[in-house]
Amino acid sequence: MRIVIVGGVAAGMSTAARARRLDESAEIIVLERDAFVSFANCGLPYHIGEVIEDRDRLLLQTPESLRASLNLDVRTGTEVVAIDAQARRVTARVQATGEEQELSYDRLVLCPGAVPVVPPLPGIEDPRIHVLRRMEDMDAIKAQVDAVDDHGAPQVRHAVVIGGGYIGLEMAENLRHRGREVSLVELADQLMPPLDRELTSPMEAHLRANGVDLHLGVGASSFAPTDDDRLAVTLADGTQIVTDLVLLAAGVRPNTALAAAAGVELGDRGGIAVDEHMRTNLADVYAAGDAVEVRHTVLPGPWLIPLAGPANRQGRVVADNLCGRDTTFGTVQGTGIVKVFDLVAGGVGANQRQLEAAGIPFERVQLHPSGHAGYYPGTAAMHLKVLFAPDTGRLLGAGVVGFDGVDKRLDVLATALSAGMTVYDLETLELGYAPPFGSAKDPVNMAGFIGANLLRGDVALWYADRFDEDTAGARILDVRGFEEFAAGHLPGAENLPLDQLRAALDGFDRAQPVRLYCAVGFRSYLAYRILVQHGFVDVATLAGGMHSYLAATELQADQDLLPREPVVSYAEERTATPVDAAR
Ligand SMILES: Cc1cc2nc3c(=O)[nH]c(=O)nc-3n(C[C@H](O)[C@H](O)[C@H](O)COP(=O)(O)OP(=O)(O)OC[C@H]3O[C@@H](n4cnc5c(N)ncnc54)[C@H](O)[C@@H]3O)c2cc1C
């Protein structure tokens, strides 16, 4: 059996390597148009930033090493330019010579990846404007960043990153790491669209604190050389940024031209349509990786989720099926994580906006536990948001942003979501604990406690992003201390510290709705329990407290909130609210 694979990086090489492990006799040919196979594309930003100093560390394999270890026939610099599915043949062009070769196959696997979106803006062809997908892109960017003038000064003093997704964020960090001034331009009014707004505003504050000049809610509209040979980037709002290098990280689209020309069916989102065995509509033609559409674990319809994990998993599934096994590919839940300077942000499953758009009912909890025991150095509060089904409590999505222990919580939640677990399961998960690593009640357990309390009716929540609806006709009680209240409070709030609440109850109208809040939601939960047990009929506590309110309303700049607290004052909040000790 001859297996021909188009594309030799994540999905393509996973397919090839597993196919060889399962079938020693198959002839396996990998055709890759670029000069490199099986390279670490996720590491590219970090070599530009010189965090990964040795370029060779990104080159995981060579055609020679793959021949030696796996007996693969890997041909780099070879682009597949046509597929004749009827004749079971591809036409491959050798880049160096232009020579075209015909190659027959028994099974064909399409793993051509994705291509960066390059908007057709005036001046976009300037050589100082780059995308980052290939080793060659990285080399070109790094050469420019490394270049110095006759006086030894860097030629790139300033860079503009267009796009606030993970590649844009990683590049912003790495360019700052190289000491360059950085402006980041994002068309949406927030960074990292897979995360909800209240999780991204701490990232924005952190980027600004690290010297990144952020332009949110506005796109680039043109590029033009300046008189002194720099590059002027004009934004849609008229802002002009004079720079030396532009990185376009405005998203990717599936690379489907070759497949479509051969009659491979595309899906509604423009990716290659595959069945659960990763088969296309053409006989013996499979596809995997960024080019294919997938089913989402939570959301309806086809999705494009260009991530390395799914690409590798799909490659394994294709190989199994090529080699006579009956393996299916399930769903993709989009588990993603990014480091932005000291901050880490990640998400899994659906976010609130996506659930709302899909009409899927949900409940949500927001909390701000510390990454590990508060008395052990080096921790800070994180923002943790968990979305779940109101009837069963089944997890639908989660987002985490913070400093320590974010990756661990994300992965526990990702595992729980893929296992179909509920908030009741999160309550009982037994997770590793010692002071440097967590708390006896881990943040994931805490999310479970709050979620399960909500579903059992032991607490009712109100939400910052529904401020007007949720507080209509209600008395808003801030149960923090006087000093905290004086430092900034919600519009219309009265201050009644928790320890004075019981004594003050006599003067209250128990029929009037009461909306409680504190710093992160714990003291107001205690107040909630007091009020409902004293006959108050309509009480709710603000999910995530002031912390979540400030994060959710960061862009709305509420006039009545005086003065505004910095969103990133996690350490102060933690001291003010000993969540860990109190629960
Ligand atoms: C800078 C960067 C950082 C990233 N960081 C992360 C991360 O941290 N986490 C994460 O999960 N994902 C990350 N990704 C995404 C991840 O790399 C991709 O999801 C994954 O590589 C997709 O695998 P693939 O095999 O589908 O495509 P690719 O890895 O892009 O491979 C496709 C290959 O096919 C070749 N090809 C295309 N057409 C032809 C043709 N006609 N003939 C021959 N060869 C062809 C291309 O040259 C390419 O080498 C990152 C991507 C980039 C660019």
Image (tube, helix red, strand yellow):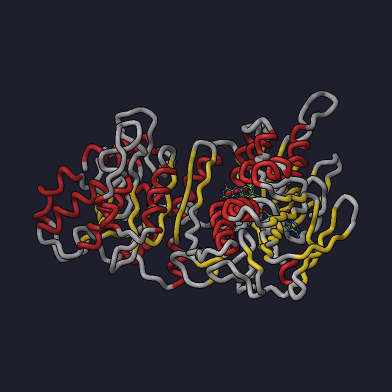
- The residue closer to the viewer here, 110 or 336, is 110
- Residue 174 in percent (x, y) is at 63, 37
- The residue closer to the viewer here, 219 or 105, is 105
- Residue 341 in percent (x, y) is at 54, 37
In the picture, the quarter occupied by the C terminus is top left
Q: Quadrant of residue 7?
A: bottom right
Position of residue 512 relative to residue 386, above or below, is below
Q: How many marks?
A: 0
Residue 558 visible in image: no
- Residue 385 in percent (x, y) is at 38, 53
- Residue 15 in percent (x, y) is at 61, 55
Residue 554 visible in image: yes
- The residue closer to the viewer here, 288 or 543, is 288
- The residue closer to the viewer here, 172 or 483, is 172
Q: Residue furthest front?
A: 25
The residue shown at (21%, 63%) is 513
Q: Quadrant of residue 405?
A: top left
Q: Is residue 215 left or right of residue 82?
A: left
The residue shown at (56%, 56%) is 316
The residue shown at (75%, 40%) is 139
Q: Is residue 278 left or right of residue 542?
A: right
Q: Quadrant of residue 81?
A: bottom right
Q: Residue furthest top?
A: 151
Position of residue 502 relative to residue 148, above or below, is below
In the picture, the quarter occupied by the N terminus is bottom right
Position of residue 230 relative to residue 23, above or below, is above
The residue shown at (26%, 56%) is 541
Position of residue 100 relative to residue 436, above or below, is below
